[in-house]
């Protein structure tokens, strides 16, 4: 795995790794947790879904493995249900390249990887706990799929850290979603500069700075609106239809510090 590339070989995978593979001409990546024995547990759009009402609903249809007319000889057939599946590594990759998501990266490395959804400053929990969460959610689900608040990357990050965003109304911890939001935000913040200067380099520098700042502040390892939730408690919250943390003050106590 290089400095700016998270590409890895299959022989380097360890149970508990958060892996991903790009889809739809690198528009979006699909994420999951490798649990060993060539198996990956991942969250897909095949369960209940809350759409965005935008063109993203069409662009991101490839977030899950494609349906094939030829059944996999390794994977058992799974009915569409709550969206969490166990697949062989080949079905998860769907012909794509294997990458490993990085945890506990330095701020410099985080900002060097300009595209979101590849790394985080947050610290991963031990592999056995990560696998326990993934397998528990395989049997109990991870709620409604939502591109911005509850997607496959959110699933994998939760399995790795046990952290959830405290408020239902805010964007989730997905780096990909934050990048989608950060681009327009950078454009908005750089707009006033266009009124006082025609310096293209200055405008571009302002936009890049705003984009990097938004990504850094919104990373799960820096946020203060997150709380540690056990996977058993998570499924209880899902059963009553709410992931909102009743005691917001807990977020400040359990948010990771650097």
Image: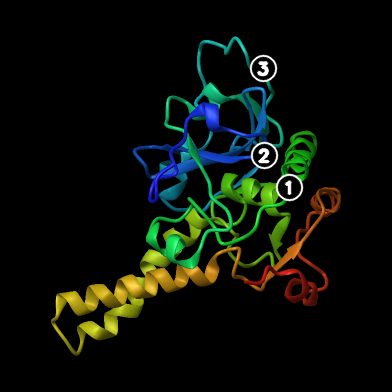
User: What residue sits 46% from the left and 61% below the top?
Assistant: 110
Residue 94's place in the image compared with 76, above or below, is below
The crowding category of the residue bearing disc 1, from other C-alpha atoms within 10 Å (few below 14, some 14 to 19, many at least 20), is few
Mark 1 in CB contact with mark 3 (< 8 angstroms): no
67 sits left or right of 75 in the view = left
**Measured from the top left, where is residue 170 in percent x and y?**
61, 67
In-front residue for pair 57/202:
202
Report crowding for label 2: few under 14, some 14 to 19, many 20 or more residues within 10 A (C-alpha). many
How far apart marks 2 and 3 lie (CA) works out to 24 Å
Residue furthest bottom as drawn:
196
Task: Give the residue displayed 47% in from the left and 35% down from the top.
Answer: 8
Q: Nearer the viewer, mark 1 or mark 3?
A: 1
The colour scheme of the drawn protein is rainbow
Label at residue 77: 3
Q: CA distance from mark 1 to mark 2?
A: 8 Å
Q: Earlier in the sequence, mark 2 or mark 3?
A: 2
Residue 126 image label: 1
Choose mark 2 or mark 3, whichever is in front.
2
Q: How many labels sit on residues?
A: 3
Q: Are marks 1 and 2 in contact (CB under 8 Å)?
A: yes
For disc 2, the marked residue is 16
Marks 1 and 3, Cα distance to the nearest angstrom? 30 Å
Compared to residue 194, the image places residue 59 above or below, namely: above
Whether residue 185 can be seen here: no
Instruction: Say which element carries label 2.
Output: loop
């Amino acid at each position: 795995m290089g400095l700016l590339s998270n590409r890895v070989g299959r022989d380097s995978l360890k149970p508990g790794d958060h892996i991903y593979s790009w889809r739809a001409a690198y528009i979006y990546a699909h994420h999951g947790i490798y649990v060993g024995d060539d198996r990956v547990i991942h969250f897909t759009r095949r369960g209940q879904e809350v759409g965005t009402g935008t063109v993203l609903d069409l662009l991101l249809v490839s977030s899950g493995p494609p349906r094939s007319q030829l059944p996999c000889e390794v994977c058992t057939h799974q009915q569409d249900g709550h969206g969490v599946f166990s697949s062989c590594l080949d079905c998860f990759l769907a012909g794509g390249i294997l990458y490993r998501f990085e945890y506990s990266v330095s701020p410099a490395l985080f900002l060097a990887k300009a595209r979101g959804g590849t790394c985080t400053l947050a610290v991963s929990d031990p592999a056995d706990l990560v696998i326990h969460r993934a397998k528990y959610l395989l049997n109990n689900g991870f709620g409604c799929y939502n591109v911005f608040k509850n997607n496959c990357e959110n699933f994998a990050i939760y399995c790795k850290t046990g952290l959830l965003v405290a408020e239902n109304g805010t964007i989730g911890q997905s780096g990909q979603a934050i990048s989608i939001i950060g681009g327009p935000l950078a454009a908005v913040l750089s707009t006033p500069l266009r009124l006082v200067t025609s310096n293209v380099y200055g405008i571009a520098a302002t936009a890049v700075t705003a984009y990097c700042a938004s990504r850094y502040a919104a990373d799960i390892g820096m946020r203060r609106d997150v709380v540690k939730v056990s996977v058993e408690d998570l499924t209880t919250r899902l059963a009553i239809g709410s992931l909102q943390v009743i005691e917001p003050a807990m977020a400040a106590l359990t948010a990771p510090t650097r």
